[in-house]
Image (tube, rainbow, N blue to C red):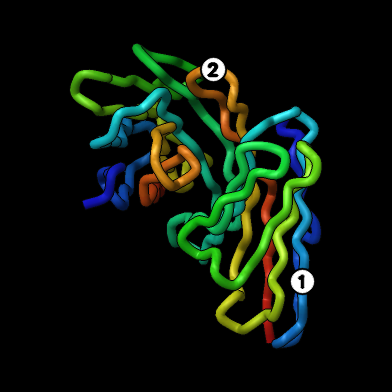
Amino acid sequence: EADIYQTPRYLVIGTGKKITLECSQTMGHDKMYWYQQDPGMELHLIHYSYGVNSTEKGDLSSESTVSRIRTEHFPLTLESARPSHTSQYLCASTSNRGTGNTIYFGEGSWLTVV
Amino acid sequence: KNEVEQSPQNLTAQEGEFITINCSYSVGISALHWLQQHPGGGIVSLFMLSSGKKKHGRLIATINIQEKHSSLHITASHPRDSAVYICAVNAGGSQGNLIFGKGTKLSVKP
């Protein structure tokens, strides 16, 4: 059973609002990721982190920020939500130890911007 | 060309059929993952491979490192196997070390 949690699961917010999506994992994983996925479409990387105080941008990072102050916590913030941000946001984690380890995904946060 | 290619993109099968989904990659990898996503659901890891073959229930995953190819097989398919199956690799580069295929949508009819 994966120990990676996302909140909120579902959220409807107005255009221009600031929103933070939370992601926490209790497995001590070094690597954490945020992906955006529209229904039936592929995953797009937003941000990733290799450890505390390490964050990197993915393909869709320009309108969001992340922080990694603690190993277990990797929140994603949209500074000013737009309808184009309506999507599912998936958080994932894996270990940096060894040559490869199982990837764990959270259950996702469904965001609707009206 | 994507660094991780899956085929087919869509697959419809009758219950009980043997199913194969393929994944080819063009980069050096340390591991390959097969993931499953049910409609409207989260993503779960099925297998993580760095060589050879793994089996879990009716699912079998193989990898050929020299040919840069992996297959996911489902024996005695069932409607509950209907899902999107995603291949992902641990590689270097700018994607945080993970590169995903576009997924194969499987529908198993009763």
Which residue is drawn at the image coordinates 69% and 71% (left, top)?
A: A78
**Place of residue B49 in the rendered image (x, y in percent of width and height, measured from the top left):** 43, 20
User: Measured from the top left, where is residue B79 in percent x and y?
Assistant: 48, 42
Name the residue at 62% across, 27% down.
A95
Which amino acid type is shown beneath numbered disc 2? Answer: Gly
Residue reaching furthest to the front: A53
The answer to which image quadrant residue A66 occupies is: bottom right
Q: Does A44 sit above or below residue B95?
A: below
Can residue B108 be spotted in the picture? no
Q: Chain of mark 2?
A: A
Residue bearing mark 1: A19
In terms of depth relative to the viewer, which is nearer, A33 or B106? A33
How many numbered marks have been drawn onto this rendered protein structure? 2
Up-down: is B69 above or below B54?
below
Q: Residue at horizontal 73%, vertical 53%?
A: A67
SS at circle 1: strand
Which mark is on residue A98?
2
